[in-house]
Amino acid sequence: MKIGLMFTNAGAFSQPDLLAHLATTADRCGIESMWTIEHVVIPAGFKTPYPYSRDGKLPGGETGAILDPLIPLSFCSALTSRIRFGTAVMILPQRHPIYVAKELATIDVMSGGRVMLGVGSGWLKEEFEALKIDFRTRGARTDEAIGAIRALWREDPSTFTGKHFNFKELRSFPKPIQKGGIPIHIGGHSPAAVRRAARLGDGFFPAPGNLNVLKDLFGKLREECAKIGRNPAEVELSAAGRLTPDLIKTFQDMGVSRAMTMVPGADRDSISRGLEKIGNELVPL
């Protein structure tokens, strides 16, 4: 089972020494990947409920440190040799796809082909308002941005025509070095996210940890793939939880190939002990 670590650019891991220790230890212990989150700002006193907690509160509160999702990936790739890196998730409709394509291709080259792009459409309305981006069009912007990014990675010159993004005969180098381009994983648990994963994703990572909800979402993904004639096995499934051998077996039975979990500690000793345990007991499963 591939083991991925979540929230690796937030809280204590916003400090470079601890982030470096996390990356090098995870690399040594056989962890498959590290994933970063994104919020460029947290509007004070925001009212939008956080959709992934029971109380609707944002973990870490309004003042928790969150590094940019991409810069730490480049930092960590320079310290490691095997572990892969991804965003879970980048709030794609808040960014211009021309810049995203350039940034990810750069990290792919610098890391030796070890980067993945996880994207979501976002949930924090007040953040969109601060950026002067229409919250109501975020889904359509996300879908178009994926197409635009892939055009820039694949074509030379690159052209894309959409309602929100348009460009003609642009030359963008370097191209990603991964064969077939950088994998794009779709986050979220809404019907729109399921459709996006089936139609546009190389992977699907729904955030809910409830097994019944996950089974339902993966079933709906297979249904959406059937509608468009796509083999659902082409969409890599990731799922998160408090990992145990039993849970990993359950994930495997559901078709999940990557099990995501929180970093086991927030200081050097607990990180080392926790990742060594994961490497010895869970990675071989």
Image (cartoon, rainbow, N blue to C red):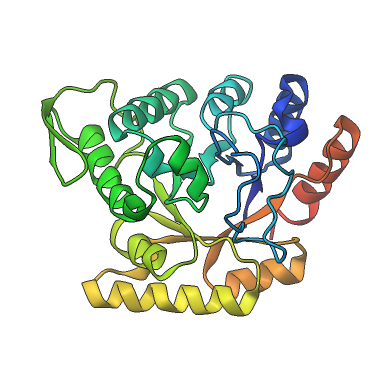
Q: Which residue is at the front of the view, 285 or 251?
A: 251
Residue drawn at 76 percent across, 66 percent down: 245
Judge whether 200 appears above or below 225 on screen. above
Residue 180 shows up from this direction = yes
Q: Residue at x 59, y 69 (%)?
A: 252
Q: Quadrant of residue 207?
A: bottom right
Q: Residue furthest left?
A: 169
Using the image, determine if residue 2 lies above or below residue 131: below
Kindly tell me whether residue 116 is visible in this rendering: no
Residue 173 at x, y = what percent?
26, 20
How many discs appear? 0
Task: Say which quarter of the image contains residue 190.
Answer: bottom left
Q: Position of residue 169 (x, y in %)?
A: 9, 27
228 over 243 or under it: above or below: below
Indicate left or right for 10 with 119 as reference. Answer: right
Quadrant occupied by the C terminus:
bottom right
Q: Where is residue 261 drawn, in percent x and y? A: 70, 53
Indicate the quadrant where residue 77 lies.
top right
